[in-house]
Amino acid sequence: MKHQSLILCLFFLLFMKLTGMRAQESVNAGCNNISSSDGTISYSIGQFANSIHTGADGELSEGVQHPYEITITTEVKEFLNIKTKVYPNPTSDILTLQIETNDMENYSYKIFDINGRQLQKSKITDVQTQINMSGLVSATYFITILQNNEKINSFQIIKK
């Protein structure tokens, strides 16, 4: 009997290994998003319910739906001749942008907030550029350096 239990356990483990564990997947019969001025709800039909919240207006069941994002990189460009630096980081007012190149033609930078809104844009005409950040609130920003409107580098900047 003990021998049969051991064989059964080994068979079960082998079966799980061959089929793959799919504990975080579910097959749904349907799904959609509902939006109103109060917010957005994503729902799926056919999932397991973890907990149920009941109120006067209805019932809400929490399940296993999790958002995920897929990013496909189709091309990686390397600019070996162009070295860029930004300092000091974190900064409180003046940020220095340094580009080590002999050709200073058609360079520019853009500063974006965490939501992707463009806040500043300017041409770069010298190897060292002083960027005034004193008018921006304390937050995280992204600076993108461009040559001929093509991105060559990006930095995350923390404004104190």
Image (cartoon, rainbow, N blue to C red):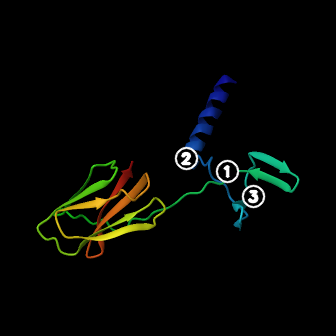
Q: Nearer the viewer, residue 44 or 90?
A: 90
Q: What is the number of the mark on residue 46?
A: 3
Residue 83 numbered tag: none
Q: Where does the image place residue 6, in percent across and percent down from the top left? A: 62, 28
Q: Position of residue 137 (x, y in %)?
A: 44, 55
Tell me if mark 3 has few (under 14), some (14-19) or many (20+) residues whose alpha carbon lies within 10 angstroms of its own: few
User: Dot 2: what SS?
Assistant: helix
Residue at image coords 30%, 70%: 122
Q: Secondary structure beneath disc 3?
A: loop
The mark that comes first in sequence, 2 or 3, is 2
Residue that mark 1 sits on: 64
- Check the image and report above or below for 94 versus 2: below
Q: What's the CA distance linking mark 1 and mark 2? A: 24 Å
Tell me the quarter of the picture where residue 119 sits: bottom left
Q: Earlier in the sequence, mark 1 or mark 2?
A: 2
| Farthest residue, direction top | 2
Q: Measured along the vertical axis of the image, is residue 87 above or below residue 147?
A: above
CA gap between label 1 and label 3 equals 10 Å
Observer-nearest of 66 and 14: 66
Residue 18, labelled with which disc? 2
> Looking at the image, is mark 1 or mark 3 earlier in the sequence?
3
> Do tag 1 and tag 3 residues touch (Cβ < 8 Å)?
no
Give the image location of residue 13, x and y in percent: 59, 38
> Which secondary structure, mark 1?
loop
Residue contact between numbered discs 2 and 3, judged by CB atoms under 8 Å: no
Q: Using the rendered view, name the quadrant where residue 116 is placed.
A: bottom left
Amino acid at dot 3: Gly
